[in-house]
Image: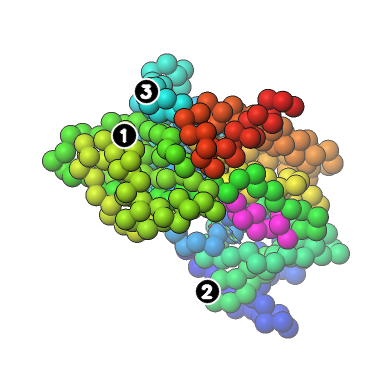
Amino acid sequence: MEQTPLQPSEADNKGTLIIPSLTDRGTECVDVAVIGGGPAGCATALALARSGLSVAIVERAFSPDTQAGETLPPGIRLTLEELGLWAEFEAEGHTPSVGNRSVWGSSRPLDYDFIFSPYGSGWHVDWQRFDGMLTGAAERAGARLLTGMEFVDSEFSSSGFWRLELLGPRGRAELRARFVVDASGRSAAFACRQPSIERYSIDRLIGVAGYLDANPRASSEERITLVEAAEDGWWYSAPLPCEKLAVIFMTDADLASARKASVAEGWLARIRRTEYTRKRIEAGGYRLASLLRIVSADSSRLSDFAGNRWLAVGDAAASYDPLSAQGISTGLSTGLGAARAIQKYLGGDPSALREYARHISEAFTSYLSDREAYYGLEGRWPTSQFWMRRHARALHALAS
Ligand SMILES: Cc1cc2nc3c(=O)[nH]c(=O)nc-3n(C[C@H](O)[C@H](O)[C@H](O)COP(=O)(O)OP(=O)(O)OC[C@H]3O[C@@H](n4cnc5c(N)ncnc54)[C@H](O)[C@@H]3O)c2cc1C
């Protein structure tokens, strides 16, 4: 993402800067402000801008943050085609992924080969290029990208529009919008400020992520995603296009394993206890190249996904366990669904937002049953807190 130069020269009597060209004609405001320029925000903004609405994306970062995992399933092709971005994606030279290997429920690995997928391979993406493609497409469609601007507060004006307070390197700024999309990821920064909206988490899953450099003389890397269950969590590893291997230990934030694995020594000691993750790292001659990074990975949802002239998309609406490897494609497809709902709503259909919210709620309920069934397949550590927590949920779901 490139920084959009703002020249907030005007200040109102509170010292707030009004973003010029969006609000400098008194009552002028954008049709839709999208808070967050990740996959979900960009997809929503792209579809809305193409439909002729004026859109601004507010993104607090100046450049894309490296994601914890960057694997896309084969079915991403359908969503990228719907966004009109498939040809551009294919031309960007991301690394095809041939399949998934899971060591789950027994010590025998099971392979799922994408050769059986009607959509071809999966993908290990270069995040900078992928993010650049999405933001570039949204900008070309007419959306205005405001980088380095953090949404901090909101107020619904009696004149029927939202006043958003933003904080940037040059101070505070105000953006007015007829409609707001919360695409700010798990923090759901806008929705969680709305009265009666809460966020529910069903677990405390975190990822302790390390990025490993390959030894150029080592044997070539298998282009697969490997998931391996362990006593107090599970391991994820996948190659990145830049000759690195992303290795992530998933566990619960409140367990002793999280504390121990958050320092390099403890993290590496835990890898040595695995079989397939360890062998993969040894075969590639990989070395830990950077500090470990701790990321939140809980399954959570908002108590409602839409309200007075706003809705939430992607992780802001509902976030999924990375085991599903569906976060980015869900973000893109909920963005498309959100754009359709907003167009209908602004076109005079008051039921469009409720219909959208119902769809997100049903998808999350269905995801929870899949999650419980999948965790229920692992029974090798019956006294481990991590697995007991998940099995209790699985048994509950089976009983209800
Ligand atoms: C450990 C781990 C591994 C994962 N691996 C995969 C994988 O392999 N494949 C996959 O598909 N998914 C994976 N995911 C999930 C995936 O990363 C997310 O589902 C996806 O990024 C969600 O997209 P989003 O646009 O909703 O939110 P995000 O990508 O989180 O984007 C939100 C944006 O909002 C901005 N923002 C936040 N607050 C504010 C604010 N107040 N003001 C302005 N801007 C703000 C942020 O800077 C960010 O750019 C993984 C997740 C984790 C935790």
Q: In the image, is residue 13 above or below residue 127?
A: below
Q: Which residues are drawn in magenta? A: 184-193
Q: Secondary structure at mark 3?
A: loop
Q: Residues within 10 Å of mark 1 (few under 14, many from 20)?
A: few
Q: Residue at x 52, y 26 (%)?
A: 377
| Place of residue 196 in the rendered image (x, y in percent of width and height, measured from the top left) | 81, 55
Nearer to us of marks 1 and 2 is 1
Q: Secondary structure at mark 1?
A: loop
Q: Earlier in the sequence, mark 2 or mark 3?
A: 3
**Quarter-of-image position of residue 95:** top left
Residues at marks 1 and 2, CA–CA distance in whole angstroms: 48 Å
| Residue named by callout 3 | 108
Nearer to us of marks 2 and 3 is 3
* Amino acid residing under circle 2: Pro
Tell me whether circle 2 and circle 3 mark residues in contact (CB < 8 Å). Answer: no
Residues at marks 2 and 3, CA–CA distance in whole angstroms: 53 Å
Residues at marks 1 and 3, CA–CA distance in whole angstroms: 10 Å
* Amino acid residing under circle 1: Glu
Q: Residue at x 83, y 59 (%)?
A: 160
- Name the quadrant of the N terminus: bottom left
Q: Earlier in the sequence, mark 1 or mark 2?
A: 2
In the rendered structure, the answer to whether residue 263 lies left or right of residue 232 reads: left
Which one is in front, 78 or 195? 195
Give the numbered dot on residue 169: 2
